[in-house]
Image (tube, helix red, strand yellow):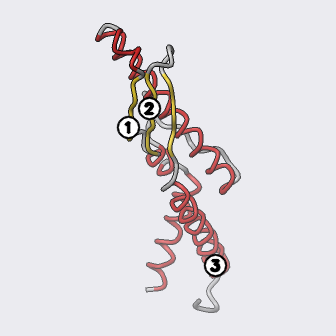
Amino acid sequence: MLAGGPGDADLDELITQAEREVAALGQLQQRLTGVTGEGYGPRNLAHARTSASGLLEELSIDPRGMRLSSHELAEEIVAATRAAATQASERIAEMYREIFGRELPVGGPGGASAASDLARDPEIQDALNGLARARYQLG
């Protein structure tokens, strides 16, 4: 660190904060790789598993589900998938609270993905912006 300037203490604090946030983000990213969600349709005839991002990874349909109309089966599948994606999001939010000690910022209308929610966290953005400014000032 360059010595002597009046803003050195502020710069040191910005760098320290940014380094903590980046380390915490790395920890969160590592833990996110194994996150999945599981859910069932209202009649328990469809079971879905989604990734952390809400993408459908696995779908199983009970043989009794084949007796449903196509519309009813579609509703069962959609409900199971939504339940699984919700569970994955809740798991991510819990991990975020454990690591950062605060709530994950909520996405916009319609529900955004966890990744875009992370990108909206003002504390993370401040830390990363501070790190970028510090790197620029240090050359």
Mark 1 to mark 3 CA distance (whole Å): 44 Å
Q: In which quarter of the image is the N terminus?
A: bottom right
Q: Position of residue 33 (x, y in %)?
A: 48, 56
Q: How far apart are marks 3 and 2 (CA)?
A: 48 Å
- The label on residue 56 is 1
Using a 10 Å C-alpha cutoff, classify the residue at mark 2 as few (fewer than 14 neighbours), some (14 to 19) or many (20 or more).
Answer: many
Q: Which of 44 and 98 is in front in this view?
A: 44
* Residue lying furthest bottom: 3
Mark 2 element type: strand
Tell me which numbered mark, 3 or 2, is placed earlier along the sequence: 3
Instruction: Find numbered disc 3 in the image and state the secondary structure of the residue it sits on.
Output: helix
- With 124 as the anchor, is 54 left or right in this view? left
Q: Which of the numbered marks, if any, corresponds to residue 48?
A: 2
Q: Do the residues labelled 3 and 2 touch (CB within 8 Å)?
A: no
Helix, strand or loop under label 1? strand
x, y percentage for residue 3? Answer: 62, 92
Q: In this view, does 13 lie above or below 25?
A: below
Spot occupied by residue 68 in the image (x, y as percentages of width and height): 35, 9
Q: Distance between the residues labelled 2 and 1?
A: 7 Å
The kind of residue on which mark 2 rests is Ala
Q: Which of marks 1 and 3 is nearer the N terminus?
A: 3
| CB under 8 Å between discs 2 and 1 | yes
Front: mark 1 or 3: 1
| Residue 15 percent coordinates (x, y) | 59, 75
The answer to which of 111 and 31 lies nearer the viewer is: 31
Residue at mark 3: 12
Q: In which quarter of the image is residue 91?
A: top right
